[in-house]
Image (tube, grey):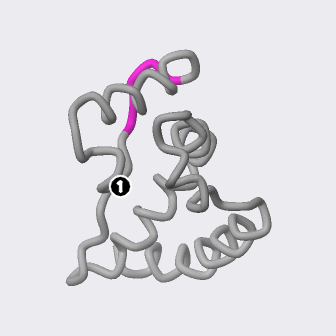
Amino acid sequence: MVLITLTPSRRNQFIDHQNAKFRIAVLLIMDVKTRWNSTLELLEHANRLWEFTCQWLQNHKYTEYGILVTTQDEWNIVKYVMEVLRPFQYWTL
């Protein structure tokens, strides 16, 4: 998240990647340590924006961050964690 929002130009480039698919661009959100539901919300946002995050990280300007691109196997683990957390969210809302 910090890499993307560090400068306005980086933020705008990330938003530009989304323009073809989403009417309203979405940015990643930060986790709030005092609210456990924010972890699930963060993971859901990150999952929704995975494709755009990969595209942004593969930009030639950010080659040093290329190692941060997540694999499909890593996202399968994240999706499993999201499925585990969803019932807790349901019962606490």
Would you say 82 lies left or right of 61 here? right
Q: Is 84 a magenta residue?
A: no
Q: What is the magenta segment's predominant secondary structure?
A: loop
Q: Quadrant of residue 7?
A: top left
Circle 1: element type: loop
Judged from this view, the residue extending furthest toward the right is 73
Quadrant holding the N terminus: bottom left
Q: Which residue is label 1 attached to? A: 1
Name the spot of residue 93 as percent of width and height, x first: 34, 72
Name the spot of residue 84 as percent of width and height, x first: 61, 81
64 or 69, nearer to the observer: 64
49 or 36, nearer to the observer: 49
Mark 1 is surrounded, within 10 Å at the Cα level, by few (under 14), some (14 to 19) or many (20 or more) other residues, namely few
Q: Residue at x 60, y 36 (%)?
A: 55
Q: Residue at x 51, y 53 (%)?
A: 64
The answer to whether residue 64 is seen in the rendering is: yes
Name the spot of residue 62 as percent of width and height, x first: 48, 43
Q: Is residue 54 above or below residue 43?
A: above
Q: Residue at x 36, y 42 (%)?
A: 27
Q: Amino acid at mark 1?
A: Met
Q: Is residue 80 above or below residue 48?
A: below
Name the spot of residue 2 as percent of width and height, x first: 30, 56
Region in magenta: 22-26
Q: Residue at x 61, y 78 (%)?
A: 81
Tag count: 1
The answer to whether residue 49 is seen in the rendering is: no
Q: Is residue 30 above or below residue 58?
A: below
Would you say 44 lies left or right of 31 here? right
